[in-house]
């Protein structure tokens, strides 16, 4: 039971480079035999994966369709235009730039297009679920721009506890008059109200940008409200819930903004586009336009709710009280005050359950320890897991963390036993496109 795209690569490379091929084989086996709960990861289809391994990688195509700096670009133009048209259809907008190498590059281009160095922009307090490209001091966004941050509701008795405090967003924006207001997050489990953000942006004269890197698949499938027509500029990754190749995308309706973004990305930020990835993006957008993609995203949400509820039944707390999307932040301290995110990540990995430590809002612990873990359901849902499997996973998580609290010997025994059960379950739900190796 292995991934055919990886099998083909393995067979090809094994002859000439057994060392590299052996590492591929080990990674493939790791992915196949473990449960992937990292919210920003997924298992791309064999078609999307194979598309990246084509002769499109050989070509330089600096510039844009019809205006390239190199000859021989006829088919580069065709594939880029197909990817753009599908992206626009998928997200219901007029213009798309499909060239960003990653989500961070898409954000860099958007910032350069919409702001001048030194300009102020407003984003969520980074430790509460933002992304490093939303103003971290050691990132371009914090080095060359002036970030100000808006909070969540921190008052435990507030019905919107740990959700976006729209009144505070408005106050921060009226006080600092940012050039750009940024919404969209890496660890926020509730729906974003783009209309409310639009009203605030209008009131303070800001450009409204949404970074939907995490929720893009849900948005494309209509399982989360669309940032259009409310947002001026929308960025995303293509490899998270959208289930495409690793890459970025910028979307907008305004032609002037489109022209600025194109210039900002090339020649502003990048050189030649990764045309093999653009080819794969077109294939992935084609998959996302099919009706079964909507069903997939509905299951992603169902599974997230099932996992969150099961964890609550074991004594954990879900930040903000639950999830509307694919992700949840689990407050481990509700189960045991000695549990940390760093330990949980390590202990669960030993049991074949992969996740990441993550700070919770106003976390008293430092970022390398944390009081929480972030869990997401895009990858497990792709494998075909349903609510029953989510309950089993929550049970395993609780058993492993309980054993870890008792010490190394208990943890070792438990992790070994759970790892075997995890592997058995994974055999029943192969990675997409998996076939018996012949
Ligand atoms: C993942 C993420 C990004 C960055 O994507 P990369 O492809 O890793 O550069 C940007 N913004 C948000 C909100 C993200 O979650």
Image: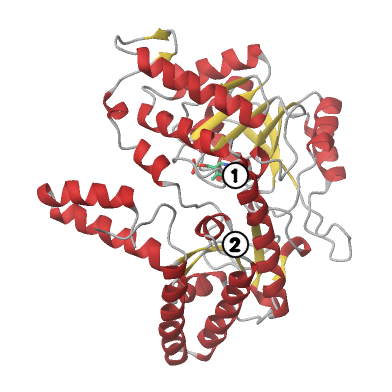
Residue 51 x, y percent position in the rendering: 37, 36
State the CA–CA distance, disc 2 to disc 1. Answer: 24 Å
In the image, is 418 to the left or to the right of 19? right
Q: Residues within 10 Å of mark 1 (few under 14, many from 20)?
A: some
User: Which residue does the image show at 56% across and 32% down from the upper left?
Assistant: 107
Quarter of the render that holds ligand 1: top right
Q: Is residue 385 above or below residue 332?
A: above
The residue labelled by disc 1 is 293
Residue to which mark 2 is pinned: 374
In x, y percent, where is residue 420? 41, 80
2 and 1 marks in contact (CB < 8 Å): no
Residue 90 percent across, percent down from the top left: 62, 31
Asked whether the viewer can see residue 438, the reply is: yes
Looking at the picture, tell me which residue is in the foreground, 73 or 387. 387
| Side (left or right) of 338 relative to 162 | left
Q: Indicate the secondary structure of the residue bearing disc 2.
A: strand
Instruction: Identify which residue, 270 or 66, lies in the foreground.
Output: 66
């Amino acid at each position: 039971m292995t991934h055919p795209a990886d099998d083909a690569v393995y067979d090809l490379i094994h002859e000439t480079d057994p060392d590299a091929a052996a590492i591929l084989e080990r990674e493939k086996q790791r992915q196949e035999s473990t449960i992937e709960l990292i919210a920003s990861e997924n298992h791309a289809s064999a078609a999307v994966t194979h598309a990246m391994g084509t002769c499109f990688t050989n070509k330089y195509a600096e510039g844009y369709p019809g205006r390239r700096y190199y000859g021989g670009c006829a088919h580069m133009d065709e594939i880029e235009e197909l990817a753009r048209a599908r992206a626009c259809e998928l997200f219901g907008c007029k213009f798309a730039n499909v060239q960003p190498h990653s989500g961070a590059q898409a954000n860099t281009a958007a910032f350069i297009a919409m702001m001048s160095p030194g300009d102020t922009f407003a984003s969520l307090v980074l430790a509460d679920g933002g992304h490093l490209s939303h103003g971290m001091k050691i990132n371009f966004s914090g080095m060359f721009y002036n970030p100000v941050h808006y909070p969540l509701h921190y008052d435990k008795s507030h019905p919107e506890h740990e959700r976006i405090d729209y009144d505070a967003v408005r106050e921060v924006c009226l006080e600092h008059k940012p050039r750009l207001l940024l919404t969209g997050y890496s660890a926020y489990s509730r729906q974003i109200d783009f209309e409310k953000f639009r009203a605030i942006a209008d009131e303070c004269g800001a450009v409204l940008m949404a970074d939907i890197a995490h929720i893009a698949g849900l948005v494309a499938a209509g399982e989360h409200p669309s940032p259009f027509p409310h947002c001026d500029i929308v960025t995303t990754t293509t490899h998270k819930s959208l289930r495409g190749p690793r890459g970025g995308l910028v979307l907008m309706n305004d032609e002037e903004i489109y022209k600025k973004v194109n210039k900002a990305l090339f020649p502003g930020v990048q050189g030649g586009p990764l045309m093999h990835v653009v080819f794969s993006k077109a294939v992935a957008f084609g998959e996302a336009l099919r009706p079964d993609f909507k069903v997939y995203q509905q299951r992603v949400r169902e599974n997230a709710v099932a996992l969150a509820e099961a964890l609550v039944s074991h004594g954990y707390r879900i930040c903000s009280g639950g999830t509307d999307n694919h992700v949840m932040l689990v407050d481990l301290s509700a189960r045991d005050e000695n549990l940390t995110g760093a330990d949980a990540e390590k202990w669960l990995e030993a049991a074949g359950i992969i996740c990441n430590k993550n700070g919770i809002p106003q976390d008293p612990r430092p970022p390398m320890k944390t009081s929480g873990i972030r869990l997401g359901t895009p990858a497990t849902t792709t494998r075909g897991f349903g609510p029953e499997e989510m309950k089993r996973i929550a049970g395993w998580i609780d058993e492993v963390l309980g054993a870890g609290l008792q010490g190394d010997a208990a943890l070792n025994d438990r992790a070994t036993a759970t790892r075997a059960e995890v592997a058995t379950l994974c055999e029943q739900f192969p990675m997409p496109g998996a076939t018996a190796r012949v």
